[in-house]
Image: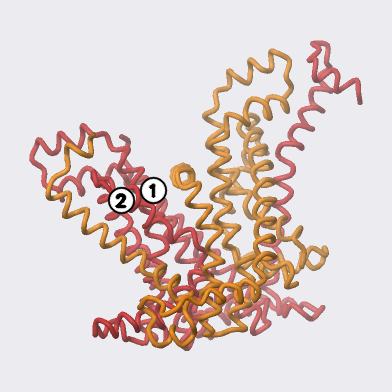
Chain colours: A red, B orange
Amino acid sequence: MNDTRAAQTTRHVTRTSGQRKLSQWIQQLVFVGPATFFFILIVIIPFFLGVYYSFTDWNGISRQINWIGIENYTHILTKDPDFRNAFWFTVRFTVVGIIVTNLLGFILAYLLTKPLRTRNILRTVFFMPNMIGGLLLGFIWQFIFIRGFAAVGEATGWTLFNLPWLGDRATSFWGIVIVFVWQTAGYLMVIYISALNNIPKDVLESAEIDGASRWQVIRNIILPLIMPAVTICLFLAISWAFKMFDLNLALTGGGPFKATESVALDIYNEAFTNNRLGLGTAKAVIFFVIVAIITSIQVRATKSREVEM
Amino acid sequence: MDVQSKYSARTLILEIIVILLGLVFLIPFYFLIINSVKSFGDILSNSASWPQQFVWSNYVDAWKAIDFPSALKNSLIVTIVSNLLLVLISAMAAYQMVRHPSRFNRILYFVLVAAMVIPFQSIMLPLMEMASAYRLSNSMLGLIVSYLGFGAPLSIFLFHGFVKNVPLEIEQAARVDGSNRYGVFFRIVCPLMMPMFVTVIILNTLWIWNDYLLPSLMLSSPEMRTIPLATYSFFGQYTKQWDMALPALVLGITPIIIFFLFLQRYIIQGITAGSVKG
């Protein structure tokens, strides 16, 4: 043992190829081993176990787990209004959420790359909500919607603020959109700012000399050049919106009448409230497939629009 | 200088508009903070106005009710230990994968990247089952181990992109001078990777610190609660008890806001760097 270590450290030319092979094996094990071990233990094994459980009637308590084939899947796809409802909410929320956050994020970035005197502090202001986790954010906004909006409504007389923001199907949807936008627009803004700063100044200047309007510059020069950032921002917004859990849980608990129940929350309720873990894992498998398909389509679609600078 | 020369009336109008928008963004913080020092009756009668009298004892009550020192300590332990181990194992794995692109390592890297789209919900139920089988449930260790596994893909991905740009010549020079692979990694490569360490630590801190679902599944004892867990169980007990809830929320967000205000520059750089690679 001491001999081999000495051979390694002093790198004797006389080292045999067998020893070199062994030391390479040890290096591979030391460098890659720990991460691989935890990754397989925490992600890969549970993932495949989950696929297995999705074909069973596992309830989480009983020792007896019966294989029931695709029954869970047919149940979810044909007679599960909760899942359909949650899926529909998640899709609507994701579409609205990604459009609004990306528009606002881009507009903020565009304005805050202008030579404003307060731009550094404003960047901080817009970014700060992102530090707070979804759970605490949900509770904070519960208060804003219930008490804060009511106070503003009283002071201004605007009916918009007097709506039952969390008590009604339609308004609670927009309530969650508002909180989501407030939380994530600043993060996307940071990414858009760095992309805007990377656009070569001479390109913009020559467009100005050629008499391009502001809108033409944005559409034909800025947007194509920041496409890599658009790819990332869309990807982030889609995965955040689609996997949303904490925010609904704290803000509305999925209510009223499951109107704001996301897929992630539905899976959670199926497993822990209804104790149907087999059904829950089947939902999770479907959820995974959908997330994988949507994100890969999106990345492929926007990547093809990226141009080399 | 640039700022001075280009400043026009148009810019001023723009500036005012963005400042107003910024103020709108801050309104939730205003409501949260002023109401946290009001009496319950004062909160209900006028939530928007300045407090009639400052009830600082709200904070004392909330501090005790959520057992803030213990929650803060637990959050710090989980976040710090997970972070340190995660950057260490991820940086080492990424380094080896870049420098030894064997078939095994290429496949492993592909699987890691592909696994990034797995939603937590897809693994949580079997993970809990395994955790109780291996007696890792209701333990900090189980929670930290879970973060290592679930956090490894993104962290390795970020380090992988970075190591590719580390010039090989420096490492070769160190090898010629008699350093072994471990020495090269810890003494030469690690210092070069400092910016990426900062990025990965920041991204993982924001995730782990704010995470609710995994700790809620893994930890059941009250004395192990992290800040999100303590806040959640507190809300279950004191529904709509706003004079207790608001100070508790202020306490809950203060550590991460302080973290942000002190490391702002690095956080924004880290997020930019992380997103460009990611």
> In terms of sequence position, does the residue under pointer 2 or pointer 1 come before the other?
2
Is residue A51 visible to us here?
no
Residue B166 placement, left or right of A184? right
Would you say the residues marked 2 and 1 are in contact, meaning their CB atoms lie under 8 Å apart?
yes
**Where does label 2 land, which residue?**
A109
The type of residue carrying mark 1 is Ile
> Is A179 in front, or is B274?
A179
Outermost residue, left direction? A211
Q: What chain does mark 1 sit on?
A: A
The residue under the point 70% across, 51% down is: B81
Q: Secondary structure at mark 1?
A: helix
Residue extending farthest front: B53
Q: Residue B115: x, y in percent?
A: 59, 53
What quarter of the picture does the C terminus of chain A occupy? Answer: top left
Q: Chain of mark 2?
A: A
Depicted A278 relative to depicted A113: above or below: below
Crowding near the residue tagged with mark 2, few <14, some 14–19, many ≥20 C-alpha atoms within 10 Å = many
Instruction: Identify residue for label 1.
Output: A191
Compared with B160, A50 (above or below) is below
